[in-house]
């Protein structure tokens, strides 16, 4: 099944809408949002996301952005978070939503603090950022 996922990366107060087409395997409703050991977020991937999302260098940040939106992200030329921000991912909140997608909650500290849900897609064996949603 092919689906079109529409996401909005909220970055430094500006929203950039992106459309990404991903291929997903069908899954049963009973398995939606369950933990998945093979696709789990490893501590190495968690640390990489935390470090790269807050990097002051756009090309470094781009390494954790999904392939389908990476070029648009780079050409936009704006960082994901303001300088001095810190991202802390809550690994216990990690949930798979399909064979190749997942969500995880994170806290941002610094100039624009807040709680966020990171929307991830599994590409080439790693979890990459495809979007974000602000949490209450």
Image: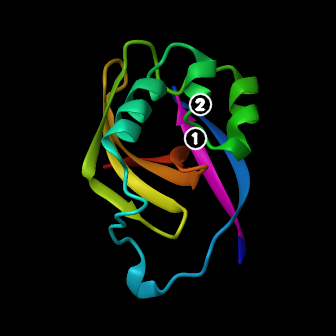
**Looking at the rendering, which quadrant does residue 59 occupy?**
top right
Residue toward you, 29 or 99? 99
Which image quarter holds the N terminus?
bottom right
Numbered label attached to residue 75? none
- Spatial CA span between label 1 and label 2: 15 Å
Residue at (48, 86) in percent of width and height = 28
Q: Residues within 10 Å of mark 1 (few under 14, many from 20)?
A: many
Q: Residue placed at 52% from the left, 69% from the top?
A: 99
Q: Which residues are magenta?
A: 3-11
Residue of label 1:
9
The answer to whether residue 115 is left or right of residue 9 is: left
Residue 55, position as x, y percentages in the image? 48, 18
In reply to whether residue 45 is colored magenta, the answer given is: no
Q: Which one is nearer the viewer's eye here, 79 or 65? A: 65
User: Which callout, 1 or 2, points to the residue nearer the camera?
Assistant: 2
- The answer to whether 110 appears left or right of 128 in the picture is left
| Residue 10 located within the stretch drawn in magenta | yes
């Amino acid at each position: 099944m092919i689906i079109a996922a529409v996401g909005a990366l909220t970055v430094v107060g500006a929203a950039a809408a992106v459309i990404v087409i991903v291929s997903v395997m069908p899954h049963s409703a009973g398995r939606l949002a369950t933990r998945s050991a093979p696709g789990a977020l490893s501590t190495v991937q968690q640390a990489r996301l935390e470090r790269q999302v807050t990097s002051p260098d756009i090309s470094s940040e781009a390494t954790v952005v999904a392939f389908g939106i990476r070029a648009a992200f780079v050409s936009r030329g704006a960082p994901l978070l303001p300088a001095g921000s810190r991202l802390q991912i809550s690994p216990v909140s990690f949930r798979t939503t399909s064979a190749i997608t997942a969500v995880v909650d994170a806290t941002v500290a610094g100039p624009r603090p807040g709680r966020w849900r990171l929307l991830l897609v599994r590409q080439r064996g790693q979890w990459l950022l495809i979007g974000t949603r602000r949490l209450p």
